[in-house]
Amino acid sequence: MMVGMDCTKCVSKGCRTSVPCQDNKSEYLDLYQDDAIRPVTTAASSLVDNGRAGNLSRLQEIIEYMHGMGYRKVGVAYCYGMEKDASLLRQQLSAAGFVAHMVSCTVDRVLETEVDLTKSKPVVSCNPLGQAAQLNRLGVEFTLLMGLCLGHDILLQKNLAMDFTTFVVKDRVFQHNPIQALYETREISGV
């Protein structure tokens, strides 16, 4: 049985210098040469190699990554509250040469009473399963997540048939910059 691990408390940082505190790479190292993994590793490393780390925005990284992978047909699963931003993203993706399929969380007009039987108001619900089904049906090669609610993003990810990444994480308090919460003095409930 493995005990916990907390690399943030490590003083030696041996995994970055000479002798790591553990060495399990024999369990997975060969996988990096797998035909399905090697192109991802190559495309990802090109974004940070030769001093490029920190010089590209997240959008620039995504566009370069998708070009490096040879993707042409991409999907965007977005929150309807970010539709203006999603339209700007569509324009950027199109300008970069991609065919962008933009799928709102309200696709198929599913009602909250149909999704959650404890609800009583028949208002339109977010529909991450519908978004995933639509993107899968369209045969997109790669999907970007844009501002989906926590939980909805998980359901979408579990049901996508293609690779994906997050472009925007929803955080209404910190203007979609959730790491800011680590630097605020606000008390976090439930912690």
Image: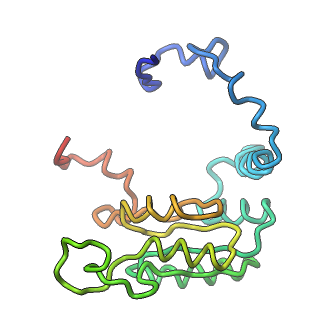
Q: Residue at x 41, y 22 (%)?
A: 4
Quick check: 2 above or below 180?
A: above
Using the rendered view, name the quadrant where residue 41 is placed: top right
**Residue 18 x %, y %:** 67, 13
Query: In the image shown, does 99 or 131 lie closer to the viewer?
Result: 131
Query: In the image shown, does 116 or 182 lie closer to the viewer?
Result: 116
Q: Residue at x 31, y 50 (%)?
A: 181
**Is 113 left, or right, of 149 in this rendering?**
left
Q: Quadrant of the N terminus?
A: top left
**Residue 124 x %, y %:** 31, 85
Q: Residue at x 32, y 74 (%)?
A: 115
**Residue 152 x %, y %:** 40, 65
**Is 141 left, or right, of 133 in this rendering?**
right
**What count of labels does the image hold?**
0
Q: Quadrant of the C terminus?
A: top left
Using the rendered view, name the quadrant where residue 6 is placed: top left
Q: Residue at x 52, y 67 (%)?
A: 145
Using the rendered view, name the quadrant where residue 143 is placed: bottom right
**Is 73 left, or right, of 126 in this rendering?**
right
**Residue 58 x %, y %:** 59, 60
The image's colour scheme reads rainbow
